[in-house]
Amino acid sequence: MSRTSKAPDTVAAVDLGSNSFHLIVVRIIDSRIHVLDRLKEMVRFGGGLDAANNITEAARERALACLGRFGERVAKMPRDSVRVVGTNTLRQARKAGAFLREARAALGHPIEIISGIEEARLIYLGVSHSVADNGGRRLVADIGGGSTELIIGQGFEPLHMESLYMGCIGMTQQYFPDGKLNEAIWRRATIAARLEMRPVAHHYRQVGWETSYGASGTILAVAKVAREMELCAEGISLEALRGIVKAVLDAGHIDKLDLPGLSRDRAPVFAGGVAVLQALMEGLKIEQMNVSDGALREGLVYDLLGRIRHEDVRTRTIEGIARRFQIDTEHTRRVEATALSLFEQVAEAWQLDQAHADSLTWAARLHEIGLAIAHAQYHQHGAYLMENADMHGFSRQEQQILAVLVRSHRRRFSKAIFAQVADDQCDRVMRLSVLLRMAVLLHRTRAARSDVMIEHARAKKNSSLEIGFPAGMLDEHPLIKADLESEQKFLSGGGFELTLR
């Protein structure tokens, strides 16, 4: 749990994309990354959702087989040196819990599901570390299997981010399901893509940029075809892209696509990706797009490197939210200090690690966020905000834990509140909630210092906590004593025993 442990010198990132799964392993030398290994498999995970958005058995088998192979490379690496994220397909998938458990077993590491905006942030981070910085604003586009991310940023900082619900797999399935390629179908596909990006196109053109970059499979494949066809020497020009569109339509059918530089694996979804790219370049009036080798997985590595250096973007996100909602930070810091003091005393017995300490810290800092909406039921308002806000650096699972901790920090305490947390974390999150509840209760007067001091905290068992106070102190503070006795009743409703000494 300690942050003083030696930082890993080798880290890995795994990107479970809708089209391809990627693994990158790097060594960190003098704060620079040196790639040791790259693996990529075309899994077509996004094409493996049925009409009800359930993961099909065939897609499940393909994904787990790939993750098993990746696991041979990373399973024995320390947990804090590997990050694994799922993108659009896992965002859309229903009842994905069983798959996530199997995937974790195959890979040896847990999988985070990230939002489209978080995906955009990580993509920009990967691209910005992979290209020269000319000091101006840059536009970054990434066409994935199920979504397309657009970012305007400067230096290493993204300024505007969007995630659009269109990608090479989805577009191919919707507009070219039988493989036919003709101008009428192509027009419908590009118009649909233009409509999807219409809400952001005008704003992006107003903001403006000096250079544009494309990343990931579709755009890299188009750039390679453009070079092989001698349409464009570097990157992708709009003129070259239109030449590729003509060659695609001339093929007449996806099965007959045989363009120079186009791999067999990419060919089945190439038309959908090219249609999206044409809509982007024409809609945003991009005459020339550069390409970047860096993308989501590289962004994951640099984000992980920031966490290792204790420059965690999640901390900045929490601080920004606290300022935005005018949270009383002096009070929440006192609550945080007490919660962490309790945490240190029970962490070993309750099998809590640094990730749990981080969740407790963030929840303590934001537990009063719901007051910005209304005092009545503010813990419920706060939980809604935590679950639905765009929080840079946080996965969906991390936001769910925060939402549950904020929701459960006062009033009713029952196991039903924790049902949305993953099974393997549910009990531990309940214990974190108990610690937060105690800290909030002991600072209810909001005084600069709590009148009640804790002598010790002991976890007698996983669902039992003993809190010791100096002799006679609770009798001297009857209101706090009454609150603690009420808390005993609340916790017992969730099967938890609180003992006061």
Image (spheres, grey):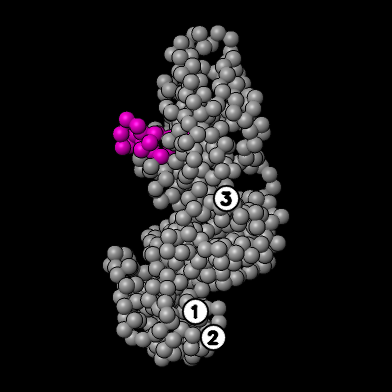
The answer to whether residue 317 shows anywhere in this view is: yes
In the picture of the structure, the residue carrying the numbered disc 1 is 268
Tell me the quarter of the image containing the N terminus.
top right
* Mark 2: few/some/many CA within 10 Å (<14, 14-19, 20+): some
| Element carrying mark 2 | loop
Q: Where residue 250 appears, x then y in whole percent? A: 41, 91
Q: Residue at x 51, y 73 (%)?
A: 217
Q: Is residue 371 magenta?
A: yes
* Mark 3: few/some/many CA within 10 Å (<14, 14-19, 20+): some
Which residues make up the magenta segment? Answer: 363-383
Label 3 or label 2, whichever comes before in sequence order: 2
Q: Where residue 363 appears, x then y in whole percent? A: 48, 37
Tell me the quarter of the image containing the C terminus.
top right
* Numbered label attached to residue 261: 2
* Numbered label attached to residue 307: 3
Q: Considering the whole magenta stretch, tell me its main secondary structure.
A: helix
Kindly indicate the quadrant of the structure image that contains residue 61: bottom right
Q: Is residue 254 left or right of residue 464?
A: left
| Element carrying mark 1 | helix
Reply above or below: 310 against 449. Answer: below
